[in-house]
Amino acid sequence: MHKFSLKPEYIERVKRRSGRKHTVVSLEGPKTALIVVDMQRYFVGKGQPSECPVARDIVPNINLLANATRQARGSVIWIQTHSGPESVEYWSAYYERMTDEGTKKRVEGMKPGGSGFDLWPDLDIKDEDPIIPKTRYSAFIPSPSKLEAELHKRKIDTVLITGVSTCTCCESTARDAMMLNFRTMMISDANAAPDDNLHNATLNQFYLQFGDVQNTQQVISMLGAS
């Protein structure tokens, strides 16, 4: 698990602006969605091209949050990246930064049926949970997205962002959620990054400017009080 802490000077800045350390102090279950980003074999599995080892460590916390969200009558939504051969053309700005070998591995691994495509088998996914595809870092791009439509259909106003990686797809999704006027939290011990520095830098900046950052037990406590 990552070693995480909020910078004291950032806490003081947030307290001066909002009057409290955490801007989210309660959660209304039916209006809350747990969004789990890209917990697929390509990012979680040992030996995969984009393996993030800490992603395996956060699986129990994601499952705890999913259970608490359902008990509070909230929604659990799984995000799954789709990267087929057509993605090389429609996201050429991304793939031009990769070698031909890297492009081939990603396209083959992340297309439906590919070795890295499936969601991690230890995740507690229920039949009623939507599984929403994405083709960019952010699950809200291109807009209007299937995720955005699903959240509005369910009358969700608060989203809890978890998954991999903290500093890429999770951060991109979380920032866009806030910009689309969802009250947004990133869960510190249910996100995974390549290293502690990237994890901490992302969460501290998000906390300072975009939304709240709390841990699994803090969130479960608020959901239990719904």
Image (tube, rainbow, N blue to C red):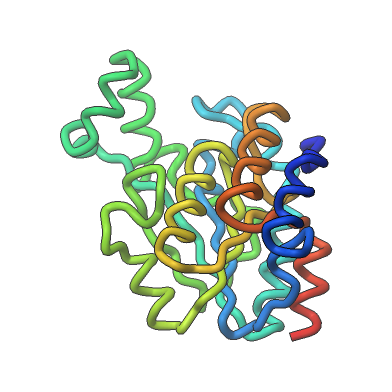
Tally of marks? 0
Could you say where residue 55 lies in the image, as x and y percent from the top left?
66, 41
Residue at 26% across, 40% down = 84
Position of residue 108 relative to residue 177, above or below, is above
| Most foreground residue, 142 or 53 | 142
Q: In which quadrant of the rendered view does residue 30 lie?
A: bottom right
Q: Please provide percent x and percent y for residue 94.
A: 30, 28
| Quadrant in the picture for residue 110 | top left
Outermost residue, front direction? 16
Q: Quadrant of the C terminus?
A: bottom right
Q: Nearer the viewer, residue 158 or 107?
A: 158
Image quadrant occupied by the N terminus: top right
> Residue at 40% of width from left, 54% of height from top?
139
Percent x, y of residue 187: 69, 54
Nearest the eye: 144 or 16: 16
Q: Residue at x 37, y 25 (%)?
A: 105
What x and y, as percent, mark residue 49? 50, 25
* Residue at x-position 58% and y-position 49%: 209
Where 52 sits versus 20, above or below?
above
In the visual, does 21 lie left or right of 170?
Answer: right
